[in-house]
Amino acid sequence: MLICVTKKIRTGMKTKITDFHLDEYAHWVADLSCGHSRHFRHDPPWQQREWVLSPQGRKKYIGFELDCKTCGSPDINRGKE
Ligand SMILES: [Zn+2]
């Protein structure tokens, strides 16, 4: 597993989407610049993210800035080690 660099916490946990890939359940996962990943499921009616299903939609989100919850949760990081 990739271990989060604690330096990132000082910068407000901001990270960027660098790429997308599919997990074993065929859900889209965003690769983040901090080394973590985050699911972007299109799972109606609970989660509406139709954009994630199209290559054009995903391309628009490359470089999108977001907070990395894994970086912001040191307890979760510890649990994975
Ligand atoms: Zn992170």
Image (cartoon, helix red, strand yellow):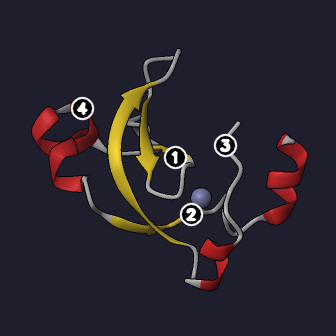
Q: Is the distance from the Cβ of mark 2 to the nearest ligand 1 atom less than 8 Å?
A: yes
Q: Secondary structure at mark 1?
A: strand
Asked whether the beta carbons under mark 1 and mark 2 sit within 8 Å of each other, the answer is yes
Q: Could you say which is closer to the camera, residue 27 or residue 34?
A: 34
- Numbered mark located on residue 2 in the image: 3
Question: Nearer the viewer's eye, disc 4 or disc 1?
Answer: 1
Picture quarter containing residue 47? top left
Q: Quadrant of residue 64?
A: bottom left
Q: Quadrant of the C terminus?
A: top right
Which of discs 3 and 2 lies nearer the camera? The answer is 3
For marks 2 and 4, give the one nearer the viewer.
2
- Whole-angstrom CA distance, mark 1 to mark 3, is 13 Å
Q: Earlier in the sequence, mark 3 or mark 2?
A: 3
Give the residue number, with chain letter if any, for mark 2.
68
Amino acid of disc 1:
Arg
Label 3 – label 2 distance at C-alpha: 14 Å
User: Does residue 13 appear left or right of residue 48 in this picture?
Assistant: right
Instruction: Tell me the tag on residue 53.
Output: 4
Crowding at mark 3 (Cα within 10 Å: few <14, some 14-19, many 20+): few
Q: CA distance from mark 4 to mark 1?
A: 15 Å
Per the model, the C-alpha gap separating discs 3 and 4 is 26 Å
Q: Are marks 3 and 2 in contact (CB under 8 Å)?
A: no
**Is residue 81 depicted above or below 9 in this figure?**
above
**Mark 1–mark 3 contact, CB under 8 Å?**
no
Q: Earlier in the sequence, mark 3 or mark 4?
A: 3
Q: Which amino acid type is shown beneath numbered disc 3?
A: Leu
Name the residue: 81% across, 54% down.
76
